[in-house]
Amino acid sequence: MALATAPIGTTEKERDLLRKALMNAGTSHVAIIPESRAAAIGAGMDLALSQAQMLLDIGDGVTEMAVFRGGRIIYHATVHIACSDFQRAVRSTILARHRVQLEDASVEKLTHVISSMQSEQESNLELFNMCGIDVAQGKRINCCVNKRDVVNAIEPVLMKFTVMIVNFLKKLPDKIYYETLESGITLTGGGACIAGMDKFIASRTNIKVIVAIDPLHAVINGARQSLNYWIGKKEHWENFTSPKLTALR
């Protein structure tokens, strides 16, 4: 038996291909649950609550938003802006300004300037000493990166990202929106690990944002918990069908 997760926006055809691949690998039964559901379980959300709760899972290439109520996903949306977009903005800016290709670890470190973007007291004149490859000479060098350049690179992407979240919230029915306002937004995925991301989203949505414990592994932890619960419950596997979900566009 196998339990797999798939992005919430995948089609039935795509899930069938995944199911067939697992069956061909030798498993007797396959269940596929939305990654957002697995992330919510891994984050410790009580999905049985009758009050609406929202999950925001910021992955590498895709961000998924899902509202849960009474054990079901009642609204969802997929945003094609995520961690890789913030990193790409930083990498291309430094490459254009310094002709240096930064290492992945350095780019990830620079995205944490988001933590200071809400504070007017923070200075944008700070310099960061980073390692990278000089694209002209092809050798490893150190370069000083201006914090203002990093902020200018990330800000447009971050603003577009938060506008999409706000638009999703605006499309929710009033009752669901106010329940979400009360319960807050749970943040998972790699984006939850970027310092200041939670506070920035909270400031733009006026909703409290809770970073999950171990947000990076929320999906795998939730999938593991789901599988452990389903082991020995044959009827779950035989009767399982993918839920019909309501997308907000």
Image (cartoon, rainbow, N blue to C red):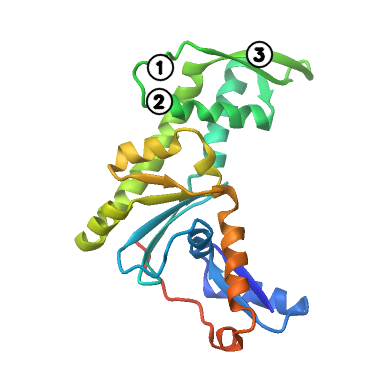
Disc nearer the start of the sequence (2/3): 2
Which residue is at 55% across, 24% downward?
93
Residue 143's label in the rendered image is 3
Determine the secondary structure under disc 3.
Answer: strand
Q: Are marks 3 and 1 in contact (CB under 8 Å)?
A: no
The label nearer to you, 3 versus 1, is 1
Residue where numbered disc 2 is placed: 117
Q: Position of residue 234 (x, y in %)?
A: 61, 87
Q: Give the residue type that dot 1 points to.
A: Glu
The N terminus: image quadrant: bottom right
Q: Give the residue type that dot 3 points to.
A: Cys
Q: Are marks 1 and 2 in contact (CB under 8 Å)?
A: yes
Residue where numbered disc 1 is placed: 122
Image height check: is 159 above or below 176?
above
The C terminus: image quadrant: bottom left
Q: Position of residue 29 (x, y in %)?
A: 67, 83
